[in-house]
Amino acid sequence: MEGLNIYVGSLEERQIRNNEIKLVTAALYEAKVKDDEILRVLMKMCDIDREEAMTAFQNEKFMLSPCRELYQYLILEKGLDAHDADVFVNNRARAALAGNPELSKLSSAKMFDAINKSKK
């Protein structure tokens, strides 16, 4: 049983570490820090290698940030409630962005339209 507690502890520690990396990446990206500087800071401050820093950065740039912006758009501009916006982002937008990273370059309004025009 003690071995299981060690595993759970290490899993929790990894989740905390991954969340910290996500938060640092999001803060730097939203502050419009240059891409290469984001990678440098991630590697130094989060003590990760370049590959892990690049993965965190790309996930932020092509998935997490566009989803946050779309969520806000759905609530503020389209009048959806938080639950419906969350369902749309998680059930439709994430899959669409995973399948087509180019969508992340669109404004939230155009991304919403593109996702709605795609198969439902």
Image: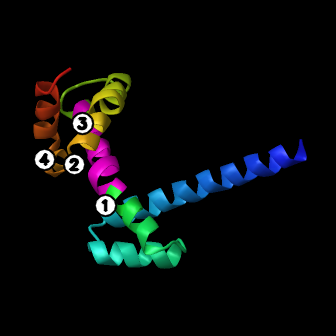
Question: Which residue occupies the extreme right position in the image?
Answer: 2
Q: Are marks 4 and 1 in contact (CB under 8 Å)?
A: no
- Residue at 36 percent across and 62 percent down: it is 57
Residue 72: within the magenta?
Answer: yes
Instruction: Name which residue type carries label 3.
Output: Ala
Mark 3 — residue? 96
Per the model, the C-alpha gap separating discs 4 and 3 is 13 Å
Per the model, the C-alpha gap separating discs 2 and 3 is 8 Å
27 left or right of 119?
Answer: right
Mark 4 — residue? 106
Mark 2 vs mark 4: in front: 2
Residue 74 horizontal/vertical position (percent): 24, 32
What segment is highlighted magenta in the picture? 59-74
Q: Secondary structure at mark 4?
A: loop
Per the model, the C-alpha gap separating discs 2 and 4 is 10 Å
Sequence-earlier tag: 1 or 2: 1
Mark 2 — residue? 101
Q: Are marks 4 and 3 in contact (CB under 8 Å)?
A: no
Sequence-earlier tag: 4 or 3: 3
Provide the major secondary structure of the magenta segment.
Answer: helix
Crowdedness near tag 1: few (<14), some (14–19) or many (≥20) residues, C-alpha within 10 Å: few
Q: Are marks 2 and 3 in contact (CB under 8 Å)?
A: no
Mark 1 — residue? 30
Per the model, the C-alpha gap separating discs 3 and 1 is 22 Å
Residue 51 horizontal/vertical position (percent): 42, 69
Mark 4 vs mark 1: in front: 4
Residue 23 horizontal/vertical position (percent): 46, 58
